[in-house]
Image (spheres, helix red, strand yellow):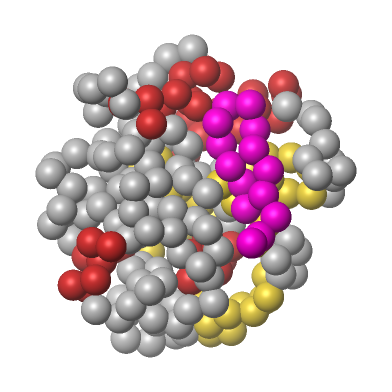
Amino acid sequence: MRPTFANEWGGSFVLIEPGTFNMGDDNGSKFERPARNVEISEPFFMGARPVTQVEWSSLMGENPSKFQEGWSAGLRPVEQVSWNDCMRYISKLNEIDTEEKMGLIGSWRLPMEAEWEYACRAGSSTRWFHSDADKDLDEVGWHAGNSGAKTREVGQKKPNEWGLYDMHGLVSEWCFDEWHDDTLRRVHRGGSWFTESDATRSSSRASANVGHCSDGLGFRLVWSPQ
């Protein structure tokens, strides 16, 4: 069982320890090639689930999400948030949450792209963290083939070996990194409820303008010890 902590907004955060992994896929798109060995040199804590609508609205006082119907809508991932919106959320979170976590001081941020894929794979080298076969995707993620054309509550599918849910599908998740040398575009990973299975693979990459919003785009928090 990995060390975890919870915050007052309902999020649970899992320790991701340093290590190395093969990032990318030699059989994937041109943006995934070549696969290469990458080192994650510092530990961090990653949200076990994407940020939810209730977590967002509790801090920001509003809910931009498209999918708000039903009594459990607050447990769906927040969407319709741009990269810039995420940075504003994180800035506000860092202003009000300065408490130690597990005896450590640190700060909130978006994951780096390499951290995201490392955490998603959780030691695996398969196309999805649990399998090479897209027929098995329903076990771990919401995608175009099973979502019913909408988001679902977070944490309903099986987690990966490190205890992270919804890494494949549901909402694609903003990362901090620029898209190559384009400072106005940022990476997002994981695919969403409306993408086909190929876009939800561990190595699949996508990007969008920093101001772009979509009902298939959300984010997951990282907390870094200092």
From the top left corner, tell me how far across and down residue 193 is, in percent.
23, 48
Residue 59 lies, with reference to residue 120, above or below; the image says above
| Residue at x 35%, y 34% (from the top left corner) | 76
| Residue at x 23%, y 22% (from the top left corner) | 70
Question: Seen in the image, is 197 located left or right of residue 127?
Answer: left
Task: Please identify the residue farthest to the top as the structure is shown.
Answer: 61
Give 10 or 190, whichever is nearer the viewer.
10
Residue 100 lies, with reference to residue 203, above or below; the image says above
Q: How many marks?
A: 0
Q: Is residue 201 magenta?
A: no
Taking the image as drawn, is residue 167 in sight?
no
Question: Seen in the image, is 103 located left or right of residue 162?
Answer: right
Taking the image as drawn, is residue 22 in sight?
yes
| Residue at x 32%, y 86% (from the top left corner) | 27
Q: Which residues are magenta?
A: 1-14
From the top left corner, tell me how far across and down residue 115 is, in percent.
58, 62
Question: Seen in the image, is 83 located left or right of residue 157?
Answer: right
Give 141 or 216, whichever is nearer the viewer.
141
Residue 131 lies, with reference to residue 215, above or below; the image says below
- Please identify the quadrant where the N terminus is shown: bottom right
From the top left corner, tell me how far across and down residue 192 is, in percent.
28, 51
| Residue at x 59%, y 84% (from the top left corner) | 37
Q: Is residue 6 magenta?
A: yes
